[in-house]
Image (spheres, helix red, strand yellow):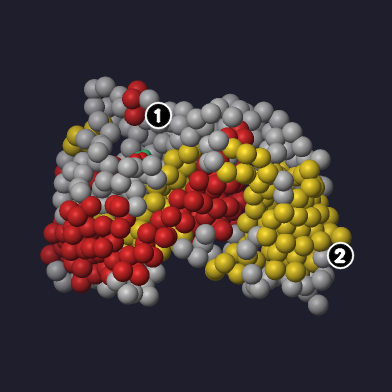
Amino acid sequence: MIKSRLVVDRDFVISELDRRLFGTFVEHMGRCVYTGIYEPEHPLADENGFRQDVIDLTRELGATVVRYPGGNFMSGYNWEDGVGPRDKRPTRLDLAWYSTETNQFGTNEFMDWCRKVGIEPMYGVNLGTRGPDEARHFIEYCNHPGGTTLSDLRHSHGYEAPHDIKLWCLGNEMDGPWQICRKTADEYGRIALETAKLMRMVDPTIQLSACGSSFWDMPTFGAWEDKVLEHCFDEVDYLSLHSYFGNHHDSTEEYFGNIELTDRFIKQTVAVADAVAARKHSKRKIMLSFDEWNVWYKARSIEDLRKPGWPVAPRLIEEVYNHEDALVVGGALIVMMNNCDRVKVACLAQLVNVIGPIMTEPGGAAWRQTIFHPFAQAARFAHGRVLRPVIDSDSYEAKSCEEAISYLCAAVVDDEATGRTTIFALNRHLEEDMELRIELRGLGTDRRLETALELFHTNMKAVNTKDAPNTVVPRENKEVRFEGETLIAWLKPGSWNVLVSSAVAQ
Ligand code: AHR
């Protein structure tokens, strides 16, 4: 048994948590759209062809935002191909994923799906093959009320009311050599600036995100952010981060290093954004949009990424997640919450089938992968202000992040409106239970435990499948109790935990 201590004080506030932190991502890639969210032939499809089982699971996942239509797909996409009568829509080669795009699902179907799920869209414009002109036309089609050719075109497609999309990405991973029409930082910074200006002229209420580096280990990380923001600093609200975690040492202890590295990645990106602010003598703070993140390392071969013959909706990067992946996803969520003063949007990539928390079979079942659970719990319970967790815990040395990793990893979210305080905690010790003593200061002496849940499995490689979908699922943790103002919990080795307590009404 190891012992850890967590001190929580109602006055140690990091920031109000933005609920957009629990976003997700739907790309026209593999089976995310076709046979993922959209499958008109499925027995559970609604009148729009949307799979009801996937809608139900997306609601249960609790995702608040959905980024669309890519990803790399975005950089070759013509929005005009995906609107209007379906039988007139062109079929095109998708050069991002070597697939055939039928365009049977496009902007209006996506907006219908968002409305039905109750999720906010985050739409990306193509700054690869296209640029400011198409972007201003597209936002006019989407957001302008009417009386112009493009807004009236939307009316003629059956959408009288503007879609009113607030959150926009200015392209995707524009520094990546794989990107369709990759750009230098100067080229992209200029185009992002000019596109942002035109889009804001059409709709001044929007918020815009510029592309940061594709990955932290891009050789130009830092320099790219600096140069891009040098150009478009005053016109954008967010800078994007993308990260896919790997288990390169095949050791769970080392794998947890991703959690610490994510924190470092965020802090370094903030430092660059703030350095640009300093140079410009600006008090403006650029916020971060961590709009692609997940575990992704098993399904990364060229065969996983590309199928021969330009197929429609091939099986691409259908990563199967295990218990340790769920722990890393939980740890990354903790890091996002603890950096919520600067990370205001985040999207788990992707939603269905393609490195997704939800899996489907065409014509068949849908089920929850292991990573579904920590995400759904964070989205469900994290409301309010994030409090700074003061942690006292033993640690171990890890090569993967070149620093000591504390066995306890935690975030605390306090909802003043309901009096509910939620602790998200990972026990990163793989053999020992952890006795965790949580001092809740200034949060009322008379508290009661509402919920204590754990995600635990003796086998780190355990997975959920179509035939065994409940192998790794959250269960109640009965080993939690209050001793005065101290909440004491016994956390199993290698477990993710959620502890919810509330003040007893006087
Ligand atoms: O999510 C899969 C791909 O990973 C996205 O299309 C791209 O943006 C990233 O490189």
Element class at badge 1: loop
For label 2, being within 8 Å of ligand 1 is answered no
Q: Name which quarter of the figure residue 13 lies in.
A: bottom right
Q: Which mark is residue 318?
A: none
Residue at image location 28% in from the left, 61% down from the top: 229
x and y percentages locating residue 194 in the rendered image: 18, 63
Residue at image location 20% in from the left, 49% down from the top: 184
x and y percentages locating residue 483 in the rendered image: 87, 60
Residue 181 lies, with reference to residue 336, above or below; the image says: above
- Tell me the kind of residue under disc 2: Gly
Residue 3 lies, with reference to residue 133, above or below; the image says: above
- Tell me the kind of residue under disc 1: Arg
Residue at image location 12% in from the left, 65% down from the top: 149
Figure quadrant of the C terminus? bottom right
Mark 2 vs 1, N-terminal side: 1
Q: Which residue bears the numbered disc 2?
A: 484
Q: Is residue 417 left or right of residue 314?
A: right
Q: Is residue 51 visible?
A: no
Q: Is residue 198 left or right of residue 365?
A: left
| Quarter holding ligand 1 | top left
Q: Which mark is residue 300?
A: 1
Frontmost residue, 153 versus 234: 234
x and y percentages locating residue 413 in the rendered image: 63, 62
Residue at image location 55% in from the left, 68% down from the top: 15
Mark 1: give few (<14), some (14-19) or many (20+) Cα within 10 Å.
few
Q: Is residue 351 left or right of residue 500?
A: left
Q: Are marks 2 and 1 in contact (CB under 8 Å)?
A: no
Marks 2/1: CA–CA distance: 50 Å
